[in-house]
Image (tube, rainbow, N blue to C red):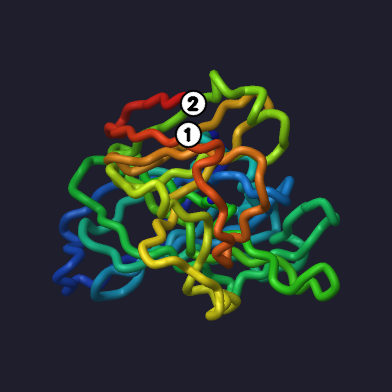
Amino acid sequence: MKYLTAVIATSALILSGCGGSDSDDSDPQKTANVSFAVSDAPVDEAQNVYIGITQIELVPQSGDSITLDVEPDSAGVDYHQIDLLAYQGKDSKLIITDEPVPVGEYKNLILHVTKESGINKVIDNAGEQPLKQPSNKLRLGSFTVTEDATQAFTIEFDLRKSLVLRGNANNNNGYILKPHGVSIIDNESAATLNGAITTITDTCLATEDNFVYLYQGSNLDSTKLGDLYDENDEEFSSTSTLPEGTIEPYATAKLDEAGTYEFGFLPSGTYTVALYCGGEADDSIQFDGLTIPQPDGQVKETTLTEGETTTVNF
């Protein structure tokens, strides 16, 4: 579900708490400076996805949480509003800069979202829709702070996976953001993948919705390459036929009008890259049984190296 690096000059962020001094997992005598940025991959139906972040909470394996308060973007508020869709591919938005925190393993990073009405919202083809965050928190999982002098992380949203409209056109309950499809990437080990369609341009660009599906690993069975789905979602259908051995995509990227694509902030390693040209819509919760790759044979393998950009063309 394309992902953030413009810095707000006024966004000095304040360390408002720190871990307990007796923690075995995060020794407060050893600290590292950390920075956090936000990036995303676009979603089909939205033009803007606004979220107002008030704090980032870091939860160590033991001891007290660390809370980083975001400097408000205007007087009289306690949040900084970000349009996630403004930062895609290698672009990112820096929201925490060089804050000292204890070195160690953290079992959770929690984004705290403002409760103020009208700040969290999605602009889609139907107009403005509310973006509701259960408990006003988004729990994103574990990460590690090492003893590096400065360690920069990017919180990468794959919005095709994480942004979900609850209800339907006749009973719209608003959008929510899920942890599914959100990754915390150490920038030092991150890689970039890009490319273009060069030999089958007419076949693909005859339709609007063309995507590249990315799968971790190599020597995969191409008949098992799956579309988007989320078995842990409350609306996932237990009657949905999910073939045994189906391989879930790690991320997806939409081809632009020129037939190019880009993934930013990917973990290094081996990947399988498959093209999907002009077919049915891909529901991010239910398994749709889409035929990937499409056209047949448009699948390639590559190895991504940390800090480098790799190009795979079709």
Query: Crowding at label 2, few (<14), some or many (≥20) Cα neighbours within 10 Å?
Result: some
Tag shown at residue 314:
2
SS at badge 1: loop
Q: Is residue 302 left or right of residue 238?
A: left
Q: Quadrant of residue 193?
A: top left
Q: Is residue 234 left or right of residue 105?
A: right
Q: CA distance from mark 2 to mark 1?
A: 7 Å
Depicted 159 relative to depicted 232: above or below: above
Kindly report which numbered mark, 2 or 1, lies closer to the viewer in this rendering: 1
Q: Give the mark nearer the N terminus: 2 vs 1.
A: 1
Q: Is residue 45 left or right of residue 79?
A: right
Q: Which residue is mark 1?
A: 298
Q: Residue at 46% across / 61% down in the picture?
A: 56
Measuring from the top left, give residue 195's x and y in whole percent.
48, 26
Q: Residue at 68% across / 28% down in the picture?
A: 205
Measuring from the top left, give residue 28's x and y in whole percent.
20, 62
Asked if disc 2 and disc 1 are in contact, CB closer than 8 Å, the reply is yes
The kind of residue on which mark 1 rests is Gln
Measuring from the top left, give residue 9's x and y in whole percent.
55, 36
Tag shown at residue 17:
none
Depicted 101 relative to depicted 87: above or below: below
Observer-nearest residue: 133 or 274? Answer: 274
Query: Crowding at label 1, few (<14), some or many (≥20) Cα neighbours within 10 Å?
Result: some
Observer-nearest residue: 305 or 259? Answer: 259
SS at badge 2: loop
Q: Residue at 52% across / 51% down in the picture?
A: 158
Observer-nearest residue: 257 or 42? Answer: 257
Can residue 296 be seen?
yes
Measuring from the top left, give residue 43's x and y in whole percent.
64, 49
Q: Quadrant of residue 199?
A: top right
Can residue 17 be seen?
no
The kind of residue on which mark 2 rests is Phe
